[in-house]
Amino acid sequence: MLVAAAPCAAGAIAKPEIALTTGLAFAVFCLLSSATYLLNDVRDAEQDRLHPRKRRRPVAAGELSERAALSAGAAMAVGGLVLAYAVAPLLAVVGVGYLAITVSYSIWWRRLVAIDILAIACGFMLRAVAGGAADHIHLSRAFLLVAGCAAVFIVAGKRYAELGEGATPSITRASLGRYSPRGLRLVLGISAGAATVAYALWALLGPGHGLWHLASIVPLVLWLIRYRALVHRGAGQSPEELIASDGGLLALSGLWAVLFVVGIYAGR
């Protein structure tokens, strides 16, 4: 969905050629992200076996050998970059940057407090940038600000949920023990506020934007409030599962999407 964000925001996703390149960029990042997850699973296998949920992962459970996982990951990384270059050379550059950040995160950045949140957020950001790179769409500052702040919000919520669970800090989350609930709540509040301000300025000042985009601010703010409340209750360790399973988040997402899309085409 992040890969499709830029062409959707530009109102270009309905064009067949844009839909094709966006789909190929989606496939590229499925390959690249799968490659890095396989590397992570090999590195974390020992710790995952001690976790009630993560121990079911194929490598930790012994269903997939470490050698096979690394071989598959390498093949996916190479295949993803080759496909990216075939779509657009700039997309391949973004793909290399994504691999560099995610692999270095697995090796180094995960140990550093705050840097680990920024590294994961950069991974989300590069997914959004990839959609623009594949389709040669200019990304506005507002788009980058909203995407970046929202990414920090989601990752900080994940760390807050992990800390609330009482997870034992280890090499898997070496930085977790140096976080505090108060500090993470502050990050959640600042990132949500910054994302809201950036989005509101875009809705108010963007060319061709009217009442539909102004109205879309409401479900966005309510979504952030709802998500933060769920994180405070202990959810959020798996953001994709939380977003896909909570009825309130789904309803607000749907309402925002309708207002956003109508606003794009009504402004033309």
Image: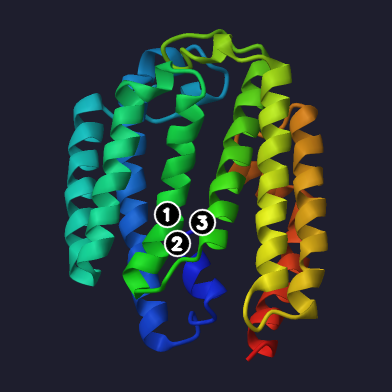
Q: Residue at x 18, y 41 (%)?
A: 74
Q: Identify the element where label 2 is drawn.
A: loop
Quarter of the figure that contains the C terminus: bottom right
The residue type indicated by label 2 comes to: Val
Query: Counting other residues with Cα less than 10 Å from the Cα at mark 2, is it few (<14), some (14-19), or many (20 or more)?
Result: many
Q: Residue at x 28, y 62 (%)?
A: 91
Q: Indicate which disc residue 144 carries.
A: 3
Q: Residue furthest front?
A: 205
Q: Is residue 26 visible?
A: no
Query: Counting other residues with Cα less than 10 Å from the Cα at mark 1, is it few (<14), some (14-19), or many (20 or more)?
Result: many
Q: Indicate which disc residue 3 carries.
A: 2
Q: Which residue is mark 1?
A: 127
Horizontal side of residue 252 vs 156, given as left or right? right
Q: Position of residue 188 (x, y in %)?
A: 69, 34
Query: Counting other residues with Cα less than 10 Å from the Cα at mark 3, is it few (<14), some (14-19), or many (20 or more)?
Result: some
Distance between mark 3 and mark 1 Cα atoms: 11 Å
The residue type indicated by label 1 comes to: Arg
The residue type indicated by label 3 comes to: Leu
